[in-house]
Image (cartoon, rainbow, N blue to C red):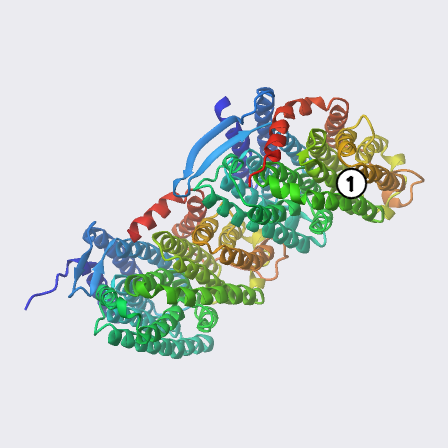
Amino acid sequence: MMNYLLSLTIWTPIVFGFITLVLFSKNDCLARYFSLLGAVIAFIFSVLMFCHFDPNQQAMQFEEVAQWVPNFNINYHLGVDGISMPFVMLNNFVTILVVLAGFKVIKHKVALYNAMFLMMTGFISGSFCALDAILFYVFFEAMLIPMYLIIGVWGSTNRVYAAIKFFLYTLIGSLLMLVALIYLFFQSNGSFEILSYYKLPLTMGVQTLLFIAFFMSFAVKVPMWPLHTWLPDAHPEAPTGGSMVLAAITLKIGGYGFLRFILPIVPDASRELAGVMVILSLIAIVYIGLVALVQKDMKKLVAYSSISHMGFVTLGCFLMANGTLNKWAVEGAITQMISHGFVSAAMFFCIGVMYDRVHSRNIADYGGVVNKMPIFAAFFMLFSMANAGLPGTSGFAGEFMVIMGAVQTSFISAALAGLTLIIGAGYTLWMYKKVIFGEVTNSHVAEMPDVTAREFIILAVLAIAVIGMGVYPDLFVSKMHTSVELLINQAAISKI
Amino acid sequence: MTYPNLFPVLPEIFMALMTIIILLVDAFSAKKSVITVLTLLTLIGCFVLQIHVSSPSTQLTFNDMFILDSLATGTKLFTYILSFVAVIYVRRYIIDKEINPGEFYAILLFAILGMMVMISADNMIVLYVGLELLSLALYGLIALQRDNVKATESAMKFFILGALASGILLYGISFIYGATGGNLQLELIVRSMLASQEQGISPLLTFGLAFVVAGLVFKLGLVPFHMWIPDVYEGSPLAVTTMIGSLTKIAAVVFMIRFLVGGLVLLSMYWTIMLLVLAMLSLFFGNIIAIAQTNIKRMLGYSTISHMGFVALGFIVVSVDGITSTLFYVITYSITALATFGILTALSKDGFECESIDDLKGLSSSHPVYAFLLMLTMFSMAGIPPLVGFYAKFKILAALVNTGLTWVAVFAVIMSLIGAFYYIRVVKAMYFDEKVKDIQVANICVGTKVLLVLNTLMLLVIGIFPSYLIDYCQKFIG
């Protein structure tokens, strides 16, 4: 079984999702429990993967290779290293919570909803594990279909606009990437192996074009300023589960793409353009942080804060001193992505809990929630603090590591990035204060019951993850040292 | 006098005979359901005969005017299968619309016969005859409902434009005939051009070529020779649109392969440029105009134009690889289009035509299975993996990049992004919007439903395992 662990992780949710769709479309209850079972089994597989992962090995692990499309030399090639492994874990972990989060809330087309989430999880795991460029692309694109439906079918008022915008934005980037991949295929004498591209010599001009193509695809996903505008539209319109997956996982594929594709495949162009990337990241961190300050809609606020936090990720990926990546910064970027996976999922879930009771996302419609929902308020406090980067929570670990790296490479970047910790604390706590503290402002709030057992479980699990990751980030960080060092070496070599 | 070898033509002869029998049965029998059965049996018979007569070596007959090579065998078998499925799809619709089945199926079989002749022709005049047989049958099919104003109008349009295009084609052929010393047989044309290659290419040939290309791309429906497509798609009854939208494409592409790659390959530097321009125009206008459509048949018409643009891009890469991708594209497109129109036909009951995108609103609530199938076909047409449309596009793009036409590939990619917009709009109508109209499913039998599901799942299966079909296409090209 260990030889097929990755396949099992990927295909279990897809198969479960398909069965849910075909068999249980009439029986909502069964559909829910069956998909929960699928998500749990997939998570167990990924835990097994985590336990058997050898952190000292440079090569890919749990590799599986099979011929897929021989005409194009496309292989079904899977494997994980220290960079991708944590994301597979995170993905399967969040999916369980997402399925649980939709348990009572989604009453309309339940089977389709659960099936779409499970299939998407499989596709996402697939794109993290794929070592064949086309296999990656297929998973990467296939993700669009479920996400499009999730936003469009179960979203709120402006969902159609948001779904189409999300779809087209993501598609344009990935189509350009497809052309880039085909180009690399012919340059490498007919290979779609991602790892074989790492050694491929490319001229500067070609590298720059490839960089742009990959950048379009991944920067839209991250999203980086100025390609971010789909995110604040998609999030408020998506259902709670959709927002959780979107923020916690799909954004990470963008960051992962920078590490897996751009840095090792086009290192010279990356070096050349690193300055631009750092500036874009800093704009995202500071400017988007300021934008978040003025939001009236809670989900929009968290969406902007996601963009701002993801700015740390791209900053970490491109901080270079003398053309060499900084190890602190890269590891910080990965840690930040994982931490943001937990924190943003938790934030969106908290907003979802309130939305289910009051059916409003406006900050102005709330006030004094603590009086009615004390347990919830405590959890929300923790997650808000994590979002603001309080030491001891996961939010601190990643940002701290990136800023550490920044201090070593460019002090101004470090200062600017550090500034956002204040802004972040500003908008998060300001929202928290308005929503939670004070007197009960209206009758809707007065009728809010505290968290149910199901919600409590989700919140507690997330709280454990957030604190655990904050207190002991080494659980994941220790697994990535070898892979990150390898990546830094690869990115330092000139390919011209 | 020696008699021609009739063996390779057996399926065609069988089909012609059966068509006449169907006409007779229609005249003398009161039971109309017999005719459908006869039609299906004819197609099965042709399929079996086709397998029987095929051999690994190329067979020529009728003074080398008729060719049966692997390309012909392969594409004919596909066309028979698709026709068989299409007849099953429209069976109920024909009864609902009170179209006389005898006429419909007889003319349809003539059209299929025309396609077979086109596929197997090795001589320009035979190609032309096949094309005319197909076109005349199609004019008849469209106008079969005499009192349907839209249908007669589109038949008229199609007829006039089609006749004009045929004239242009014939005019072009006559120039080539003159320039190559009186040759119409494709291989002889190539030989005579090779012989006179040193003297350069005569202007007469290039002049003729321009006309030939214009005539050919009219049938394929490339911009600016596309005007008939949206009107015909919209005006025809869905049953006929199903036939035009899916069956005829394969024959048209094989026709192009025979003409351009088989006969005029030495002029490829001229016609690749012509096709490149036309293909890019088609991709651009097809996709842009499709966005504005509210009628799904018309939208699919414009979408066909853009798909045929992709097909033409495959021709530009004049290599086995390019032609294979073209063939793969057109076969998978035909399967996709067949499923799409099959679903739309199934949703049309009692004379109601499911043709406005608004009609599809809320379909996912009332008919989740149909909505899901239609969604798959739409995503396939948009080229989203793992559906087959992705591989079809991918293969063409790969062929383009391989020949250094990366910029064309980028253009095509951007255009397919625009294309994605109107496909996902259909999905949007089905999944996101509230129901406007009660759509009833025609009382089609379980077999038809299963066939529809299988047809659509084929898109997924070929999309995940494309190798078999690609290999198969490669074998056709040889």
Estimate how packed mark 1 is, as few (under 14), some (14 to 19) or many (20 or more) residues with alpha carbons within 10 Å.
some
Q: Nearer the viewer, residue B234 or B386?
A: B386
**Is residue B68 at least partly visible in the picture?**
yes
- Give the residue at x 85% y 44%: A444
Q: Nearer the viewer, residue B9 or A314?
A: A314
Name which quarter of the figure residue B105 lies in. bottom left
What number of labels is visible? 1
Q: Position of residue A124 (x, y in %)?
A: 59, 38
Q: Of the residues shown, which amino acid type is indicated by label 1?
A: Ile
Q: Position of residue B9 (x, y in %)?
A: 19, 61
Relative to A174, say whether B281 is above or below: below
Could you tell whether B22 is left or right of B471 in the image?
left
Task: Please give the chain letter of the residue carrying mark 1.
Answer: A
Could you tell whether A1 is left or right of A263 in the image?
left
Q: Which residue is mark 1?
A: A351
- Give the residue at x 53% y 43%: A202
Q: Position of residue A382 (x, y in %)?
A: 82, 30
Could you tell whether A307 is left or right of B364 in the image?
right
Q: Position of residue A321 (x, y in %)?
A: 71, 35
Furthest-right residue in this view: A439
**Is residue A1 at least partly visible in the picture?**
no
Element class at badge 1: helix
Split into 4 quadrants, where in the image is the C terminus of chain A?
top right
